[in-house]
Image (tube, grey):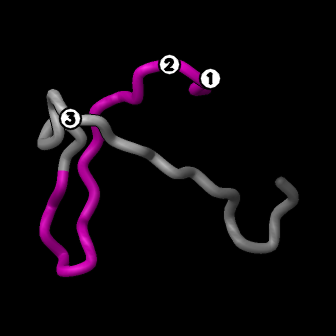
Amino acid sequence: MLLEGNKAPDFTLDDQDGNPVSLVDFQGQKVLLWFYPKASTPG
């Protein structure tokens, strides 16, 4: 479980055009990761 202040593990996801984007692509830059609960779940 990630806690506030923890470093996020490296991951790769597709962008809106289907191109892979990795967290490491932003090394040295400030990045905001936004997590939200799955639809129709409490949280």
**Residue 36 - label:** none
Dot label at residue 3: 1
Q: Residue at x 18, y 55 (%)?
A: 21
Query: What residue range appears in magenta?
Result: 1-21
Secondary structure at badge 3 equals: loop
Query: 10 Å neighbourhood of mark 2: few (<14), some, or many (≥20)?
Result: few
Q: Quadrant of residue 23?
A: top left
Is the residue marked by circle 3 packed among few (<14), some (14-19), or many (20+) residues within 10 Å? few
Q: Quadrant of residue 36?
A: bottom right
| Chief secondary structure of the magenta portion | loop
Asked whether the beta carbons under mark 2 and mark 3 sit within 8 Å of each other, the answer is: no
Magenta stretch encompasses residue 33: no
Image side of residue 19 versus residue 4, left or right: left
Image quarter (top left, top right, bottom left or bottom right) of the N terminus: top right
Dot in front, 1 or 3: 3
Name the residue tied to disc 3: 29
The amino acid type, in three-letter code, at marker 1 is: Leu
Give x and y (percent) for residue 39. 72, 72
Q: Earlier in the sequence, mark 2 or mark 3?
A: 2
For the residues labelled 2 and 3, the Cα–Cα distance comes to: 16 Å
Q: Are marks 1 and 2 in contact (CB under 8 Å)?
A: yes
- Helix, strand, or loop for circle 2? loop
Residue 43 to residue 15: above or below: above
Q: Nearer the viewer, residue 42 or 28?
A: 28
Q: Which residue is mark 2?
A: 6
Real-space Cα distance between discs 1 and 2? 6 Å
The residue sitting at the bottom extreme is 17
Callout 1: few (<14), some (14-19), or many (20+) C-alpha neighbours within 10 Å? few
Find out whether residue 18 is within the magenta segment. yes
Q: Amino acid at mark 3?
A: Gln
Question: Horizontal placement of 22 versus 7: left or right?
Answer: left
